[in-house]
């Protein structure tokens, strides 16, 4: 049975897509069967996996509107080792179209159930807003991975996200929980970041992943080459940290 995780944070610019593509690549590198679902109309996770969003024939849009299955729509990201259910600008229109449909928040869950045995991990890259698309992701998932920078405003955003997850858990998806907080773009030389990191560990305990992703130029450069950092430069510190994170996820998965 596939473990389905949303990578979500209502604050933008915290490395959600970077985390999604690099965790997918790290898991694939460690021999896992991975499906990446891009739920963001900007399609950054699609492009960051080496797939041109302008060229895809079928996307997550078609799956949500039930005109295609995941088996038909998912494509192999050859250099990365995982499959991608792509997104492009069409997806922005799905927001409006879904509102009128039955079971509009369960569409992705139903589609994923049909391919449950084909993957070990399904990673869903959510948009930063709480939209119908994000809701589809949260209704499908066993849990949420929250990438966050160790800064004051990030703590405020985390409060909002925790409240959202509680509401979805209570009303739509009893399985949903926070799997863990991943500290990203971390610089131990900055005192505030160390303080916020300590606060997170004190408050959330083992919900804070052991792995810490350092601030790393090679990770930032990788998307311009259409690749995750793990594939673009495997020797970079950031890439190695994401492979370590993938190993931590494999270790934790049976317990979740």
Image: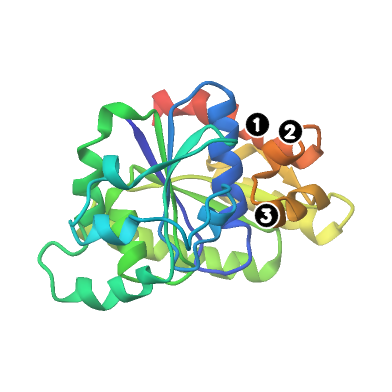
Nearer to us in this view, 253 or 97: 97
- Give the left or right position of residue 194, taking residue 223 as reference: right
Q: Which residue is mark 3?
A: 223
Which residue shows up at 59% across the image and 48% down it?
19
Query: In which image quadrant can residue 63 be found?
Result: bottom left
In the rendered image, which residue does mark 2 sit on? 240
* Image coords of residue 72 (percent x, y): 28, 43
Label 1 – label 2 distance at C-alpha: 5 Å
Q: Earlier in the sequence, mark 3 or mark 2?
A: 3
The residue carrying pointer 3 sits among few (fewer than 14), some (14 to 19) or many (20 or more) residues within 10 Å by Cα, namely many
Task: Examine the rendering and report whether any part of residue 113 can be seen.
Answer: yes
User: Can you give x and y, in whole percent of width and height, for residue 79 in the image?
Assistant: 60, 36
Is residue 66 shown above or below 24?
Answer: below
Residue 133 position, x and y percent, is: 33, 65
Name the residue at 36% across, 63% down: 134
The reply to whether the C-beta atoms of the residues labelled 1 and 2 are less than 8 Å apart is yes
Q: Which mark is residue 243?
A: 1
> Label 1: few (<14), some or many (≥20) within 10 Å?
many
| Residue lying at 43% horizontally and 71% vertically, measured from the top left | 89
SS for dot 2: helix
- Provide the secondary structure element on which disc 3 rests: helix
Position of residue 6 measured from the top left corner of the image (x, y, whole percent): 42, 50
């Amino acid at each position: 049975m596939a473990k389905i995780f949303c990578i979500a944070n209502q604050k933008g610019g915290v490395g959600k897509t970077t985390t999604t593509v690099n965790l997918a690549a790290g898991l694939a590198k460690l021999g896992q069967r991975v499906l990446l679902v891009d739920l963001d109309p900007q399609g950054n996770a699609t492009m960051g996996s080496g797939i041109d969003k302008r060229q895809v024939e079928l996307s997550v849009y078609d799956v949500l509107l039930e005109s295609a299955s995941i088996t038909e729509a998912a494509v192999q990201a050859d250099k990365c080792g995982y499959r991608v259910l792509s997104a492009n600008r069409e997806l922005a229109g799905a927001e409006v179209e879904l509102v009128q449909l039955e079971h509009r928040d369960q569409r992705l869950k139903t589609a994923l159930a049909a391919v449950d045995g084909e993957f070990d991990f399904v990673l869903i890259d959510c948009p930063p807003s709480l939209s119908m698309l994000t809701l589809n992701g949260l209704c499908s998932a066993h849990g949420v991975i929250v990438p966050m920078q160790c800064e004051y405003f990030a703590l405020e955003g985390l409060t909002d996200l925790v409240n959202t997850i509680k509401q979805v858990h209570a009303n739509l998806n009893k399985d949903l929980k926070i799997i863990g907080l991943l500290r990203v773009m971390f610089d131990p030389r900055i005192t505030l970041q160390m303080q916020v990191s300590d606060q997170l560990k004190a408050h959330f305990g083992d919900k804070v992943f052991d792995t810490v992703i350092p601030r790393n130029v090679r990770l930032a450069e990788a998307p311009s080459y259409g690749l995750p950092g793990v594939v673009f430069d495997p020797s970079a510190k950031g890439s190695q940290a994401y492979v370590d994170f993938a190993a931590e996820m494999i270790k934790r998965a049976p317990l979740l």
